Amino acid sequence: MQPIPDHLRKGLKILFVGFNPSIRSAETGHHFANPTNRFWKLLFQAGLTPKQYVPEEDGQLLNLGYGLTNIVARPTKEAAEISKAEYLEGAALLQQKIKNYQPKAVCFVGKGVYQQFSSRRAVDWGEQPESVMPGTVEYVAPSSSGLVRMKLGDMIEIYKGLKKFT
């Protein structure tokens, strides 16, 4: 399975960071491609996109000032398959991407993603009081995976907090 391409450029409003590609994403070459993943629905219902995009349109998010990447590039069936060494390497690479592309905000799509990036255990939803990367707002939103049991309405409210960066 091949990693999927990042969608990055300088001056992004928001860089969305997932755990790693799903097997379905690796098969299709597109981010958040699993049919049970709610990422595209969350962005639309939170008012962050003018329509509900589909995974095959992931590159078009750049036109809105949004980028996509993952903390770990290797596709897996579930995040539990990712090793500590992969997270450490991925966090260092992500710091370099943030430094190079300088997004206004980085949205970690899942508390666990941010915990691996920041080495912090106690993390609340939304904007983090202190950024690991100075000059960039770090924002934590729920994972959009279909495995997450949070109510969609509650998830949408958290994602709406990103509107101030658009």
Image (cartoon, rainbow, N blue to C red):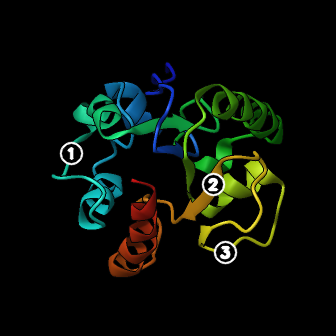
Element carrying mark 3: loop
Amino acid type shown at disc 1:
Tyr
Amino acid type shown at disc 2:
Val
Circle 2/circle 3 CB separation < 8 Å: no
Residue drawn at x 64%, y 55% as measured from the top left: 138
The image shows residue 140 at horizontal and vertical percentages of 59, 62
Cα distance between the residues tagged 2 and 1 = 25 Å
Element carrying mark 1: loop
Cα distance between the residues tagged 3 and 1 = 28 Å
- The numbered disc on residue 53 is 1
- Counting labels gives 3
Could you say which quadrant of the image residue 111 lies in?
bottom right
- The numbered disc on residue 137 is 2
The image shows residue 121 at horizontal and vertical percentages of 81, 67
Give the label, 2 or 3, closer to the camera: 2
Relative height, residue 152 to residue 113 (above, below):
below
Residue drawn at x 23%, y 33% as measured from the top left: 57
Nearer-N-terminus badge (2/1): 1
Nearer-N-terminus badge (2/3): 3
Q: In front: 96, or 89?
A: 96
Q: Find the residue positioned furthest to the left.
A: 51
Pointer 3 residue: 124
Relative height, residue 5 to residue 50 (above, below):
above
Amino acid type shown at disc 3:
Asp
Relative height, residue 2 to residue 79 (above, below):
above
Could you say which quadrant of the image residue 154 lies in?
bottom left
